[in-house]
Image: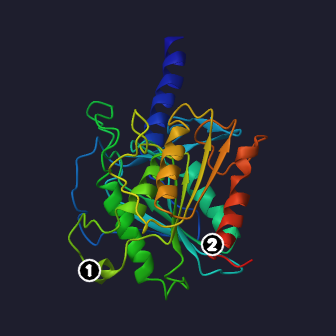
Amino acid sequence: MKRGILLPCLLFVCAGLQAKNVVWQPSAGHTQMPIWPGTPPDTQPVPGPEYALTGTSGKPQFAGRPVTGIHDVSRPTMTVYFPKGKNTGAAVVVFPGGGFEVLAIDLEGTEACDWLVSEGITCVLLKYRVPSVPYDWHCKCRPDDFALSVPALEDAQRALRLVRFHAGKWHIDPHKIGVLGFSAGGYLVAEASTDFERRLYAPVDAADRESARPDFAMAIYPGHLATDNDKLNPNVPVSRETPPTFLVQAEDDYTDGVNQSLVYYTALAKARVPAELHLYAHGGHAFGVRRTHLPITRWPRLAEAWLRTIGVIAH
């Protein structure tokens, strides 16, 4: 009888080990490409080899479907999703969230790309390095919640430069390249939008002569933007050069808090940066682009209207 119990247990353990060793791959027809030609700058040790797990990322399931998280990314990549029909010429680099601990690669990554390409927008999914500052895997904590997210920001800047460098080949307008990020990825959006002149790494090739400034930005339930006394994080110095920005958050978001978007929007308004803010009574945190009965999950339609308003896509 003990052997009968032991065998299923061993099978379960083996299955768990196999699941942990799975490395995420994009769907057929899409290829990951490294964003650095050699070792990335400011390489930091990670707990182990990269792996993907379904039912993780701090949110095992949403809208009746599981969430897949990628852990321990030391070799950042980007995957390009091209529109199959109409091509607006616009492109968006997507930053999944996950608290800089993990990447919610489907809920806040591939599914966002599916939406964007359906609207004729090229999507570039960035698998940036995690764990990364502000998260510290040694203590499983965030000693400085408002720290600049190097090396994730280096990966974001590099990805934006690469998209501009390949714009002609990829049928992209180099003046219509934006960013979209969720949660921690929303903070990365704000950093990319405000720190684009900051040289975080030495140029490695011709692509690094391109600008790292996004032409527009969408931050969805962002974090790390508002300090405890509701002041703007000094690591996101909003200026008149900050690109037009679209923000969405729920008032019952108790993970990052609605004040994150409010403080950032106020700074954008003071700098006279064109911005649009949508607040909803319900929605919580980490809803991605999955539809539920809640009105907040229809935010992509509002984003499409905003992209038309600022001239990124045609009416």
Q: Residue at x 23, y 75 (%)?
A: 203
Q: Residues within 10 Å of mark 1 (few under 14, many from 20)?
A: few
Q: Position of residue 151 (x, y in %)?
A: 29, 55
Q: Secondary structure at mark 1?
A: loop
Task: Spot the residue most to the top.
Answer: 1
Residue 29: quarter of image: bottom right
**Which residue is tagged 2?**
310
Q: Residue at x 54, y 77 (%)?
A: 176
Rendered view: 55 above or below 2: below
Rendered view: 301 above or below 158: above
Q: Residue at x 69, y 57 (%)?
A: 300
Whole-Å distance between the Cαs marked 2 and 1? 32 Å
Q: Which mark is residue 205?
A: 1
Q: Position of residue 55 (x, y in %)?
A: 56, 37
Q: Residues within 10 Å of mark 2 (few under 14, many from 20)?
A: some
Q: How many marks?
A: 2
Q: Secondary structure at mark 2?
A: loop
